[in-house]
Image (cartoon, helix red, strand yellow):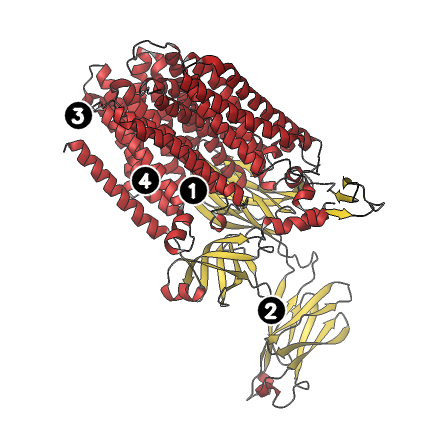
Amino acid sequence: MNAKVIVAIVVVVIGVILGVSNFIESNVEYSDFATAQRTNKKMQVKGEWVKDQESQFDAEKGQFIFYMKDDSNTVVRVVLDGAKPNNFELATSVVAKGKFEGDVFHAEMVLTKCPSKYEGDSEAVKQSL
Amino acid sequence: MIGGIVIKIAFFSALAAAYLYYRVHRTQSNRWLLVARNGYHLATLSLMTSAAIMLYLILTHQFQYTYVWNYSSTDLPLPLLISTFYAGQEGSFMLWALYTAVIGVFLMQYSSRKDYEPEVMSVYSLIVSFLLLMLIVKNPFEYIWNSFPNDLIASGPIPSGVTNSVVLDAARGIWARFPVEGKGLNPLLQNYWMVIHPQVLFSGFSAMAVPYALAVAGLMKRDYHSWIRVATPWSVFGAMVLGTGIILGGYWAYETLGWGGFWGWDPVENSSLVPWLICVASIHTTLTQRKSGAFVKTNFVLSLLTFIAVLYSTFLTRSGILGDTSVHSFVDPGMWVYWLLLGCIALFSAIGFGLLFVRMREMPKVPVEHSIVSREFALFLGAFALSFVALFVVIGTSSPIITTILKNKASAVEISYYIQTNLPLGIAITFLSGLGQLLWWKHSKTTSLLKSLAIPTVLGLATTFVVLLLGSEEFLILLFTFCSAFSLFANLQVGYGVYMGNPKFVGGSVAHVGIAIMCLGFVTSERYDEKKTVALEKNKPVEALGYTMTYVGYHPYEGEKYAFSVEVEHAGKKRIVAPTMYYSEFTKGVMRHPDLINYLTKDFYVAPLSLEEPTGTEQKFEILKGDKVEAGSLQVTFMDFDFSNMQKGAMVEGKDFSIGVDLEVQDGKKKIPLRVLMKNTPQGPEYPPVPYVAADKSSYEFTLVRLLPDRDDKSKSKVEISVKLPDNAAFPKKAETLVIEASIKPYINLVWVGTVTLVVGFFLTIIRRVEEARLKGSPPSSE
């Protein structure tokens, strides 16, 4: 076996280890608030915005604060770094990615899921007649 | 209707051309060659016709077509209206197919001169026909009443008020209505980038089919070497165009979409990066084969993979499989497209790799040069590292699929995954791109390697030292900085030497200089950026990150959009940035676009977050029983509590009750009683605001904040109230406040300068390789 083959094998092994470990580490699991709070890990929680509770933008900190109910009906105060996400009012569900800090879920990102295009389109086509 | 038929004609003639070209190849007789050519030309012509029809439908606002209705509207300016051609899935497939077909016309002429036409064009026509099949499955010319039969089709007599209607079946009295206005173009896409970027990107995507077709042709002809010479100019062309498209997209994201950076590792971005990486890797390994004849199989594999990667990328971003896991919303195009895309990947992989497998045994085995310190080995490692980057990006982007299979729950990887896996590879790539060039140069000159290493190493260390002073302590980042700088100076040195010898050969060095400069730009702008959220009250200067910002107000533009002007003072100079925000009916949300000041050494980047409306000044008072406070022009006295509305025991039993607080307001000479209260409801206490209009017509609002009764000494009981003062000059309200995120991107210009340099390098290389391919039969030139 020559030196080059050994170099190549070492590089491949290091590469595979690097890839696999990072892949596992950086995959953020989908979960609910209870699990996220118990494990204190970064998680993604799907749920919906509780519209009748307070929601506001804190101008000093640049954070958007709202209440979110996850699929197992736990309501939690969510603090998002940034402005109110686009389509927030329309969203049928939202996904918050972040970590618990005490009783508050500190989200670094909130994705909004909008009604499927074609459900909306039937309405839109009637409007544009 | 007619458009759909023309597409079908295009599809069948492309398929026929593929078959006839194959027959020419099998029989080695030119009997069918002319027919095959005409078939291909007919396919291209038909596709061009259908594209022209589509454009005509868009320009004349024919909203009876679903596609036109879905993406355009009558209020769009002409360039944007044209760009709605490729705003949706069907249209962008059509653009891709169109560019692929047109490139094929040039490829036909080119390959016929190289004696490659039947093989290349049979493969290439098959590719074109599959792209056309996509357009048959997902017809861009569908009538809107076929998309929404329940909403639009009716029977019986047409009511007199209906203007836009068409009779579908006169005998049975069936007719349909159609819209008078389209849904319009997503505002995110409404800028000049939309006119340029997709065009360039799809040209690049289309060009990636050529190396694949040439590789398969080489396998068909049992020609394992000279196909490379034929393919290289196309690979370099594809890499140049796709690379330009990718970076244009990055600049779009940075400058207009407000992603905060030029690269977000988004699936859409990644899926164009992967084919580019593989293509660049193949350009490097073919260099070795040209010289020593080694890497025959590697070159086939990489050239085949370039196109397979394009197909896989398309599958990822177009099949709807990534669904919920990205900021981009991926429209689910339906099962047909999903399976057709998968089928395409399977078919073209099977053709390419199947043939490769069959031919493998008869391929020449050329031993690779043994020395570890050789240009060949450096090239090999470099290409290897590039392929690994591509692989990691593919795995990361496919994460939702992988996790669905493994855990039955889709989840995406975070950006940190891409950085942590690619940083070590980036270090290797930049280092090798310097070393490899020096090794090559060493061969042609008599300079010793060590001597040639000296200058780049010293200058690289100097650069790293400067970066160290800037404050980085991350070892890998410093190493990456060193390797990038090393590569920059090594390639400048080599480039200068080459230029002195033969200026035509300088393309490689120039491209590497470009990459090295880009890498340095990545480090400075992404690792040394500073960010801060700032609230800017109107006309009040605020200092942040060394800049003094003053929000001076907003003004409308283009109708209902608003630009927010912020004066930025830095180093004695004043400039205005105007980020924009507006409500979009299309997305039903607020659209935000950043603005930036481009200094030579940095960008000052302002992303708007929100505008806080002015609120009247509110004052809070704690008042002792019988005491008087001054609120605006009024004097307020706390008289007494009123417990009359509180039945005995109600508090204990949790029933509704209320507690009043009697105030006396002295307004000028009049004394007016006013009652604020707390209502207890099952949901908790409520404090309803009580409006009061003063004698001077200014309006106040009183709200009870809390009760502070003293049980022992009733005279020490207090209440807290809040008074909203009227909005007038006497009581200036807090002005409207613009909230922004300000950031500094140091030396981001390096990224753009590097990009331009890279493209120039590619361009010089194409000129050289085209010239070389023209001199058919001449001995391999020295590299």
Q: Chain of mark 3?
A: B
SS under mark 2: strand
Q: Residues within 10 Å of mark 4 (few under 14, many from 20)?
A: some
- Residue tagged 3: B370
CA separation, marks 1 and 4?
A: 14 Å
Q: Residues within 10 Å of mark 1 (few under 14, many from 20)?
A: many
Residue drawn at (25%, 39%), measured in percent from left and top? Answer: A12
Q: Nearer the observer, disc 3 or disc 2?
A: 3
Please state which amino acid type lies under the numbered disc 4: Leu
Q: Quadrant location of residue B746? A: top left
Q: Quadrant location of residue B331? A: top right
Identify the residue at the far right of this view: B160
Q: Chain of mark 4?
A: B
Check if mark 1 and mark 2 are on a common chain: yes
Kindly check if marks 1 and 2 are in contact, taking CB atoms under 8 A apart as contact. Answer: no
Q: Position of residue B500 (x, y in %)?
A: 31, 12
Q: Quadrant of the N terminus of chain B?
A: top right
Please say if B69 is above or below B738. above
